[in-house]
Amino acid sequence: MPAPGPRVRAVAGAPGAPRTAGRRTTPRDPSFRRSLALFRAFMREQDDPGTCYTLLARDAADQVEAYGGPIGGRTVVDIGGGGGYFTEEFRRRGAHGFLFEPDVRELGPTPPEGAVVADGYLLPLADGSADVCFSSNVLEHVDDPQTFLSEMIRVTRPGGLIYVSFTNWLSPWGGHEWAPWHYLGAARARARYERRTGRPAKHTLGENLFAVHIGPTLRQVRARTDVTVVSARSRYWPFLAGAVTRVPGLREFATWNLLLILRRCP
């Protein structure tokens, strides 16, 4: 892997840098227009993944910069980024972006230069290597989320940002391609998908898809002493994005996709 590039320590709004006067520490709730555009792209994901993930990557990079300031010149580690759409967007904005993906099949025919096949449980990185550690919709695909999060935190420098989003099991999309029928049981939902499409489902509960919940995840990260929770909110919801995650029970259904922004403690 290429050596991480130089870091920019004095970027306004970056972790450890002074905040610009009047700058919001929490972004506004996303607009209906933005949520609708993402939803429409998501509905075409299997037929047009390029359009879907390019749009999602731009949106995710906007979120990273909203919380941590411009990423130009900073080291961003993308864990489980598949075909590299997020890494390419980070690089387009001037970041030193590196992709670590455990499944070589997910990299596609033209992975980003320098992509590394590596397990998210044991990243080939020194402690504190990254200014931003990023993971989009990966946590529900690992059977040990705590270890995965611990590794993300380990490779993030003190003051750095950790971006984690995942689709929680009880959300309408928790079953992924066989949602929302997962509410009637994973095996039944998977069988229904295969009957209707004539092809095997990509995901199998307990193998490459796991029932991750919001409440336990929030309790685990809040109990840690090496990170602070900057924000816990719905990634796509167009209003009350933070409020919905504070209501036990309701949040498991209404959040849809949890976005966690963590700050590495000194």
Image: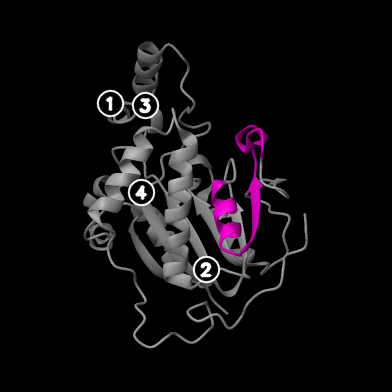
On the image, numbered disc 4 is attached to which residue? Answer: 257
Does the CB distance between marks 1 and 4 fall below 8 Å?
Answer: no
| Whether residue 46 is situated above or below residue 256 in the rendered picture | above
Q: Is residue 159 left or right of residue 235?
A: right
93 magenta-colored: yes
Disc 2: CA contacts within 10 A as few (<14), some (14-19) or many (>=20): many
- The earlier-in-sequence mark between 4 and 2 is 2
Q: Residue drawn at (49%, 47%), measured in percent from left and top?
A: 139
User: Could you tell me the amino acid type at mark 2?
Assistant: Leu
On the image, numbered disc 1 is attached to which residue? Answer: 184
User: Could you tell me the amino acid type at mark 4?
Assistant: Asn
On the image, numbered disc 3 is attached to which residue? Answer: 178
Give the spatial CA distance, label 3 vs label 1. 11 Å
The magenta span reads: 85-110
Residue 235 image-quadrant placement: bottom left
Q: Is residue 170 left or right of residue 197?
A: left
Q: Residue drawn at (38%, 16%), measured in percent from left and top?
A: 191
